[in-house]
Amino acid sequence: MSKAKTRQEVATEYGICTKTLRRWLKKSNITLPSRDLISPKMIQEIYNRFGCPIMSDGDPLMSNNSLG
């Protein structure tokens, strides 16, 4: 499973700012603990909701094997 990440790291993966990430999460009723790292379980929930982020080379950030 992946490691915990900051909100900035997750936002960067999607190519958005943290404010936009916050709006996405609020609109989708995903609540994160305040000011803590985002757990791998919550990161997976975010990826499931918004899709797997795409790296700059066009490849998915995670393989399908790691989605389980």
Image: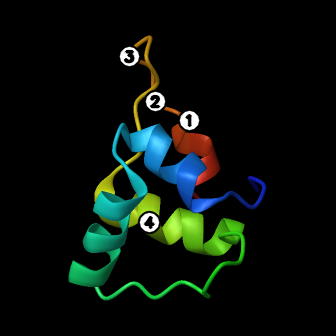
Q: Nearer the viewer, mark 3 or mark 1?
A: 3
Badge count: 4
| Residue neighbourhood size for the residue with mark 2, other residues' Cα within 10 Å, grouped as few (<14), some (14–19), many (≥20) | few
- Say whether marks 4 and 1 touch (CB < 8 Å): no
SS for dot 3 = loop
* The C terminus sits in image quarter: bottom right
Residue name at image x 56 percent, y 38 percent: 62
Q: Which label's residue is closer to the chain start, 4 or 2? A: 4
- Pointer 1: what residue? 63
- Say whether marks 2 and 1 touch (CB < 8 Å): yes
How far is the residue under mark 4 from the one under mark 3? Answer: 19 Å
Between 65 and 8, the residue placed more toward the observer is 8
- Pointer 2: what residue? 60
How far is the residue under mark 4 from the one under mark 2? Answer: 15 Å
Q: What sort of colour scheme is used for the picture? A: rainbow
From the top left corner, tell me how far across and down residue 44 is, in percent: 55, 64
Q: Which label's residue is closer to the chain start, 3 or 1? A: 3
Q: Amino acid at mark 1?
A: Ser
Q: Amino acid at mark 2?
A: Pro
- Pointer 4: what residue? 46
Q: Nearer the viewer, mark 2 or mark 1?
A: 2
| Residue neighbourhood size for the residue with mark 1, other residues' Cα within 10 Å, grouped as few (<14), some (14–19), many (≥20) | few
SS for dot 1 = loop
Q: Nearer the viewer, mark 4 or mark 2?
A: 4
Residue name at image x 53 percent, y 33 percent: 61
Indicate which disc residue 58 carries.
Answer: 3
State left or right for residue 62 relative to residue 15.
Answer: right
